[in-house]
Amino acid sequence: MGSLARVGRPAAWVAGLLMMMMVLPAFARFRERRQGLKRIESIPASCRESRYGSGDWIRTLPFGGRNRRYVVHVPPGYDRGRRYPVVLFFHGGGGDAVHTRSFPGWEGLADAEGFLVVYPDGTGIMKNRGHSFNAGSCCGYARDHQVDDVGFTAALLDEVERTFCVDKARVYATGFSNGAMMSYRLACELSSRIAAIGPVSGTLGIDNCRPSRPVPVIHFHGTADPYEPYKGGKGRPFPGKFKANVFRSMNDMTQTWRGIIGAPDPPASTVRRGGATGVTWRGRGQSEFTLWTLEGGGHTWPGGGKIPGAFLLGSVNRDVTATQLIWGFFRRHSMGPAA
């Protein structure tokens, strides 16, 4: 008989559990290294004292009784003597911070333009994948468990601003689907720290949105989106889900945000590029709301690459590239002098 059998089944079970607890963290670290991620072990007093520089970093942040993750991409040539803009990218429902990094093409643009990209990770039943954000009416585990993702984002920004030298007046949020909805929630509830947002295929999921300042928005939405319909109402349930969510129409979304920023009719400008039409309304101060309507577009990222399950999501519009247009929009908007 083996040694575990001699000590009895309960003891063997405990020994096996302890061994698994020792192996799993090592496996997680191995997977991070394979993905080129270095770990942020501790947060410095200030970015000037930080030993972290260019590259790809992962951090575990204890918040709300959970260990939350985020990934930071820092461009080559990072200089602690400068202040860098930050783009927060929120993954879609069922995604995670690590595996969606290459999907929207933000890192190549960040390297060329000189800004940081931060990928917050949602929560879910599984530890490192299949996650969602609590955007209000959507989605999944995070909504059902009322996870404080606004508080998590604020705590994340506190850490990032101490670890890397950030221009606090130029922190932006974008995301896809559930992540787009999360960016809207931040514009409502964390507007003192978010300069502008760029949601793609996701609408506002909370009522009584009262930002402390009129947050500029550039939004992309396909007219043939099967999951978050352009005309609103129930979307198709996502694979593995049986309950359909109900979403605002883009007409309602436009009217709502125009009211928030005080943007009257008629639109200030209209741009057409093939099957993509961008309409802009200007509001108080430098705020504006731009809606890009993608004729026949699905639940997809315009100009984006192929993603798993694309045949379920609909067509990808190639007349515009959302990542480029969102960054161009962000560059025009800040909250004032760097802090």
Image (cartoon, rainbow, N blue to C red):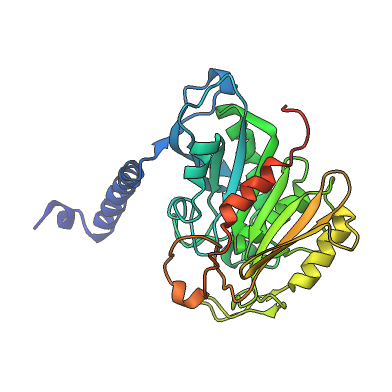
Residue nearer the viewer, 246 or 296? 296
Q: Residue at x 80, y 52 (%)?
A: 288
The image position of residue 321, as x and y in percent, is 56, 57
Choose top left, top right, bottom left or bottom right for residue 183.
Answer: bottom right
> Going by the image, does 130 lie left or right of 19?
right
Q: Residue at x 57, y 73 (%)?
A: 298
Residue 226 in view (yes/no): yes
Residue nearer the viewer, 77 or 90? 77
Choose top left, top right, bottom left or bottom right for residue 123.
Answer: bottom right
Vertical position of residue 213 compared to residue 77: above or below: below
Q: Residue at x 45, y 72 (%)?
A: 310
The image position of residue 213, as x and y in percent, is 84, 45
Vertical position of residue 200 compared to residue 237: above or below: above
The image position of residue 330, as x and y in percent, is 68, 44
Figure quadrant of the N terminus:
bottom left
> Going by the image, does 136 lie left or right of 241?
right
> Going by the image, does 81 lie left or right of 306?
right
The image position of residue 92, as x and y in percent, is 55, 61
Choose top left, top right, bottom left or bottom right for residue 253.
Answer: bottom right
Residue 146 in view (yes/no): no
Total numbered labels? 0
Residue nearer the viewer, 258 or 158? 258
Vertical position of residue 4 compared to residue 25: above or below: below
